[in-house]
């Protein structure tokens, strides 16, 4: 059986490239606390990182006949509670993203991997749809809750 260093060397065309890859991997591994709880370490290192940069700030939301998808873990309400609020305003809640989706509501307690630009499938799909010209709006759950609260209090 080949040693890991040899396997990496076989993957690259030069020893210099392989050495650089090995060095990078060692740096990554040394940065991980293998004796501790890795989930706790990820939580600590990403607690201040959020997905706000992807989301629309102060969104202008139209509900009538528009399609809404929810992703992530919500802090302010349950997923079913949010779906009911969307229905009450004339929107259409769905479980998955399609070209018909107008809004993606993103829960604040998403996957910790988001801090490393490894978003969940719905967020990745929405980003790719945007790149392809679709006008899907990504909205943080707190901003969306503010929109709904304003609609309810002004009614």
Image (spheres, rainbow, N blue to C red):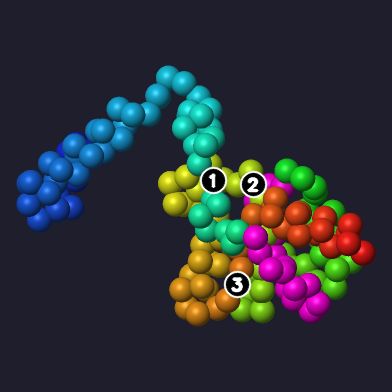
Whether residue 140 appears in this view of the structure is: yes
Identity of the residue drawn at 31% across and 35% down: 28
Say which label, 2 or 3, has the lower sequence index.
Answer: 2
Disc number placed over residue 50 in the picture, else none: 1
Q: Which of the pair 39/138 is nearer the observer?
A: 138
84 vs 32, left or right, is right
* Crowding at mark 3 (Cα within 10 Å: few <14, some 14-19, many 20+): many
Per the picture, the main secondary structure of the magenta-coloured stretch is loop
Instruction: Tell me where residue 32 appears, x and y as whole percent.
Output: 37, 29
Which of the 4 quarters of the picture holds residue 75? top right
Q: Residue at x 66, y 73 (%)?
A: 102
Q: Position of residue 140 (x, y in %)?
A: 64, 55
Alpha carbon distance from label 2 to label 3: 19 Å
Mark 3, secondary structure of its residue: loop
In the rendered image, which residue does mark 2 sit on?
Answer: 108
- Tell me if residue 65 is in the magenta stretch: yes
């Amino acid at each position: 059986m080949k040693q890991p260093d040899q396997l990496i060397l076989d993957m690259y065309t030069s020893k210099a490239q392989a050495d650089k890859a090995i060095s990078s991997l060692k740096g990554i591994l040394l940065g991980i606390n293998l004796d501790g709880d890795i989930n706790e370490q990820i939580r600590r290192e990403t607690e201040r990182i959020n997905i706000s940069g992807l989301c629309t700030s102060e969104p202008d939301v139209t509900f009538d006949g528009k399609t809404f998808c929810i992703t992530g873990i919500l802090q302010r309400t349950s997923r079913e509670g949010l779906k009911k609020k969307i229905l009450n305003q004339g929107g259409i809640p769905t479980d998955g993203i399609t070209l018909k989706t107008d809004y993606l509501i993103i829960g604040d307690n998403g996957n910790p991997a988001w801090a490393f630009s490894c978003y969940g499938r719905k967020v990745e799909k929405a980003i790719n749809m945007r790149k392809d010209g679709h006008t899907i709006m990504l909205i943080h759950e707190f901003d969306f809750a503010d929109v709904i609260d304003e609609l309810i209090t002004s009614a």
